[in-house]
Amino acid sequence: MKIVNTKFIAEIGVNHNGSIKLAKKLIDHSSKIKADFVKFQVYKTEKLVNKGSKTAPYQKRKKSISQYDLLKKYELSYNQHQGLYNYCKKKKITYLASPFDLDSAKFLVERLKLKTIKIASGEIESVDILEYLSKKKVKVIISTGASTINEIKNALNILLKNNLTEKQITILHCTTSYPASKNEINLKVMNELKKEFKTEIGYSDHSEGILVSLAAYLLGAKIIEKHITLNRKLDGPDHRSSIEPKKFKELINSIRNLQIILGNKKKILTKSEKINKPYIRKSIYSKIRINKNDKFSNKNLILKRPQLGMLPKDLKKILGKKSKKNYKTGQLINE
């Protein structure tokens, strides 16, 4: 198996709950646990959803609220995102974002000069955003929740129309459910995506816990995206499908350890094995006293540890031959 150097996206999304203070705390934690990216959602509500639109089932709250009002509550201005971008630089973690309208995409590329743009599952049919990005020198990470193979193909055809190449695109398998249940995750789709497309493959994880992300790594995920929150009980649509910093750190450390454990496909002796090998292998020893000119046989020879002389494979070479010297019982045979 090829070793995969996986990158981690700590998805803040709207888990800042509209608070810059909370957003910065999440950036602090994401930097501390050594995530590679911290990701936000950039949008203008009026350009994203009609007023009065109903919320998705996972967005529903105790108090009835429209999707417009819900998203408006969590909307951050471009200036606020500029501030968060600067704060990420200070904290030495890469700011990443998903645009949900064309103007927001332009803001990220032209004002913030982002080198990588994340396309959310819901924007896989947004022709305006895809065509715009196809003309730019950026990398694109695209989630595929609620998408068919044909819809993914169509999105890639648009992205590849101009300047972008397959090497600049990463496709993330994803299940659009918050949290995603085990029977809907269908992680083996990653193998089909690898066969179908010439891009890197990753996983956007909306399940509870870290087990699915670990499995995605073993299937070759180059990028793993997971929502981060300070408290899964906070009010908001994504907190329940998120993990807290301590758990996120466990995820990153577990995968980094898996990278070491998996090693490479070459069968080699390790340093410790070279040291231990003589102690666990055998050589040819005398079972009883052997006098010079006695013939070696299975009655007077035995294979024992440690391996300090002739190898077991040499036994056949000396059986029936006369001993060149005297051997005491338990003495290493050296002919």
Image (cartoon, grey):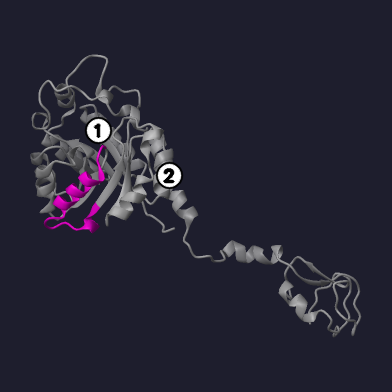
- Confirm or deny contact between disc 2 and disc 1 (CB under 8 A): no
C-alpha gap between disc 2 and disc 1: 29 Å
Please tell me how many numbered marks the rendered image carries: 2
Residue 23 has which mark?
A: 1
Q: Does 231 appear above or below 332?
A: above
The residue under the point 40% across, 49% down is: 219
Q: Position of residue 165 (x, y in %)?
A: 19, 58
Residue 215 has which mark?
A: 2
Nearest to N terminus: mark 2 or mark 1: 1
Q: Does 62 appear above or below 192?
A: above
Q: Does 216 appear above or below 287?
A: above
Q: Which class describes the residues within 10 Å of circle 1: few (<14), some (14-19), or many (20+)? A: some
Kind of residue at badge 1: Ala
Q: Mark 2 or mark 1: which is in front?
A: 2
Instruction: Please indicate whether residue 8 sits to the left or right of residue 274 in the image.
Output: left
Tell me which corner region of the image, top left, top right, bottom left or bottom right, holds residue 300.
bottom right
Q: What span is in magenta?
A: 146-169
Q: Position of residue 143 (x, y in %)?
A: 25, 43
Q: Residue 252: in sight, yes or no? A: no
Q: Position of residue 278 (x, y in %)?
A: 69, 67
Q: Position of residue 138 (x, y in %)?
A: 17, 53
Q: Nearer the viewer, residue 177 or 240?
A: 177
Q: Does 183 appear above or below 219?
A: above
Instruction: Please indicate whether residue 194 sits to the left or right of residue 210 in the image.
Output: left
Q: Which class describes the residues within 10 Å of circle 2: few (<14), some (14-19), or many (20+)? A: some
Q: Residue 330: in sight, yes or no? A: yes
Secondary element type, mark 2: helix
The residue under the point 42% across, 44% down is: 215
Q: Is residue 147 magenta?
A: yes
Q: Find the residue positioned furthest to the top.
A: 63
Kind of residue at badge 2: Ala
Q: Nearer the viewer, residue 182 or 335?
A: 182
